[in-house]
Image: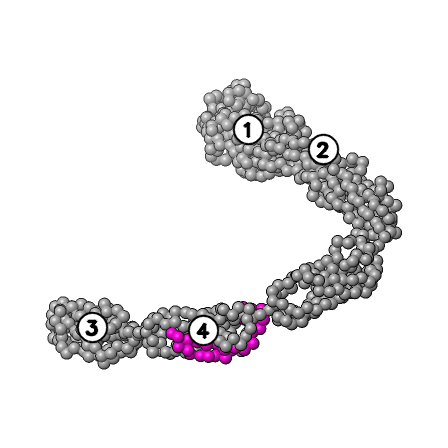
Amino acid sequence: MKRAIIVLAILLAMVLVASTIGCNKVEEIREKVRDVISHSKPVVAPIHLPIGQAAAASSSEYPVPQAPEDTPAGAENTDSPQASKSTQEPDLLIEGITWRPLNPAPGELVAFTITVKNQGGSSAAASQVYYYVDGSRRGAGSVSPVPAGGELTKSFSWRVESLAYTVKAVADGDNQLVESDEANNEKGITFSGMTIPEPDLVVKDITWTPLRPSPTDTVTFTVTIENQGEGSAAASKVGYYIDDSEQGSGTLASIPAGGTTTGTFTWNAETGEHVIKAVADYDDAVFESDETNNEKELASSKIYLADLVIADITWSPSSPSPTDTVTFTVTIKNQGNGEAGSFQSNFYADNVRGGGSSGTSVISSLAAGAAATGTFTWVALVGSHNFSAVADHFGQIVESDESNNFKLATLAVAYPKPDLIVQDITWSPSNPSPGETVTFSIDIKNQGDNIAVASQAYYYIDGSLQGSGAISSIPAGGMATGTFTWSAELGSHTIKAVADYSDAIPESDETNNEKESTFTEVLLVDLIVDDITWSPLNPFLDENFTFTVSIKNQGKDESGSFQVYYYVDGSQKGPTDMASIPAGETATGTFTWKAKLGEHIIKAVVDYNDDVSESDETNNEKEFTFSETTVPEPDLFIESLTWHPLNPSPGETVTFTVIIKNQGSGRARSFWIYYYINGIRIDPSGRVLEIYAGDTWTETFTWGALPGTYSIKLIADPYNQLSEINEANNEKEATLIIE
């Protein structure tokens, strides 16, 4: 009893330790506990746990729950206990074999529990139980004395090697006991073709940071391992390679079916292109459904290089004067594909670094495509000067091109001079008429850095000198204005002004003294008949309708008032007095006329009396041919034919109702309607006095019903007395059955 308590204490300690040391250590402890238990006396009352319950202390080894009532799929009993005999001798048999886990995978350790029962009539002395797998003995266990009717359990473990195998236990394995039945000591379980879910480890992805590493950068690779199988994968290793050179391996935790985990490794980037590879289950420790898909290789991963250049050198002020402090801005750009780490750039004025100020700029890093700036100052001196900059002065950065780190710029400094330009040329009035006096204003600006003394400006129109004007002195940045006049002439003209015509003033730029402007064409009116429309579009004979004449001033000046005359077939229908029309605008005039049959020529003449001076006097008329006038005609059709009663009996009087519609455009004068029954005309016929366009007329006639089938037919205007739009739709037929 004392030893059993010690064993229970050890098992409890094992459970507590499991929470901190993991499953592998627990398994080692279990093995040691089994050794202790195998030399311990069993507890008389064995412990049985229901299926699925966690194991607790047992009398022999670590406990295993009893097997379910039915053997699992693929397992079958190979032996059955015989019924106990009614004798005073013991009779040991294997009462049951259970195991955990129920569906072990190849390579997994399985714990088997053997229940030994004494179904004899007297106590069984101590004995041995033997364990077999596939006929090979895997061990034995000492069985303490078992009282009559009592039972106890023994355990052994075995690591599964295949899906099909047989497990057998034999009580009194060495036949040391005298039993009432010596033939019932064995029991076996055969496992055949059991479906065991297996894992399948694959390298799902390989990523790295930074994405675009430069040489010597520390690159961190992240390898994602996925278990795409149906069973859980135990802990495993993943191997890492670059250019087929092993970079080490990493240990991964177990991965459930469908789960993923990641491993990482680092590498110092080297110039060139490299092949990255990862291998899941690196040491083949995991049994997988597919052992051929553990590797993933990235075809190529390129190490990117920086390429530093001096993109630009600028300065302010752009045209310095002697003694001015000039600020230089140097733009350094990384035009390569890789990031540049820390580097130093130096700047020089006339080969002196900094030119009197700090000529160094330290840039901590510069991403691919990015730019940075550095500045230095210099006090301007008269003369021509060289300014240069060197990126990565000490060659700290490995670049794709080491020959393009230098840039040179030149700057000439001179004493300040004026610089006269013609800033603008304007005139008034903006749209002169021929002969009108136009005044031109010439704005002359001194955009130089020194005062411009008094000078002369010359003025030209179409290359012909129009005169000159004295221009007073102009301070730097100032403005002066000169004027001249001209009598406007038809056409477009080129106006030119020249500042400092005689080159009396020394300027910083002697090439920019002239300016030309194109003078807008001297404006005239130009009236035309733009369009002639009428309403309605298709008038009927003798109908009054309206013509609308659209008159446009397509000239450049406003027209003033004028008259418009209208003609139909040469007969005058106007005139209409028109108000002034601005340039580009349109106005309308109208007249009416009573429609007549035939084609007609409609004409409009603008500015009939030549009241307006126009740029083109030949385009004032326009003619249109007016299409033939339409004569309105009727169009009769039988809209409906009904009768009452709807189903007459023989001898009844039937009343027929006819509705005739005029769907034409003209009035239908008096006409007849004939009624026919089975081709025989029924008198009296109907007489319609008249139907206006769109109106209807209703007529009725009666008939004494007789048994039989009858064709009822109506004809409007049977003699075609009316001229209609459609002469083919004047009839209507219906069938009437009388029973």
Look at mark 3 in the image and give the residue it sits on. Answer: 720
Label 2 vs label 1, nearer the camera: 2
Q: Separation of disc 2 and disc 3 at Cα?
A: 108 Å
- Kindly identify the amino acid type of the residue bearing the numbered disc 4: Ala
- Kindly identify the amino acid type of the residue bearing the numbered disc 2: Asn
The answer to whether residue 43 is visible is no
Quick check: marks 4 and 2 in contact, CB under 8 Å?
no
Residue found 78% across the figure and 44% down from its top: 409
Span highlighted in magenta in the image: 553-578
Between disc 2 and disc 1, whose residue precedes?
Answer: 2
In this view, the residue in front, 306 or 173, is 306
Q: Is residue 682 left or right of residue 691?
A: left
Residue found 54% across the figure and 75% down from its top: 612
Look at mark 2 in the image and give the residue it sits on. Answer: 268
Label 4 vs label 2, nearer the camera: 4
Q: Secondary structure at mark 4?
A: strand
The answer to whether residue 685 is visible is yes
Q: Residues within 10 Å of mark 1 (few under 14, many from 20)?
A: some
Look at mark 4 in the image and give the residue it sits on. Answer: 604
Taking the magenta stretch, the answer to whether it contains residue 570 is yes
Q: Separation of disc 2 and disc 1 at Cα?
A: 32 Å
Look at mark 1 in the image and give the residue it sits on. Answer: 291
In this view, the residue in front, 174 or 227, is 227
Taking the magenta stretch, the answer to whether it contains residue 482 is no
> Considering only vertical position in the picture, is 95 above or below 468?
above
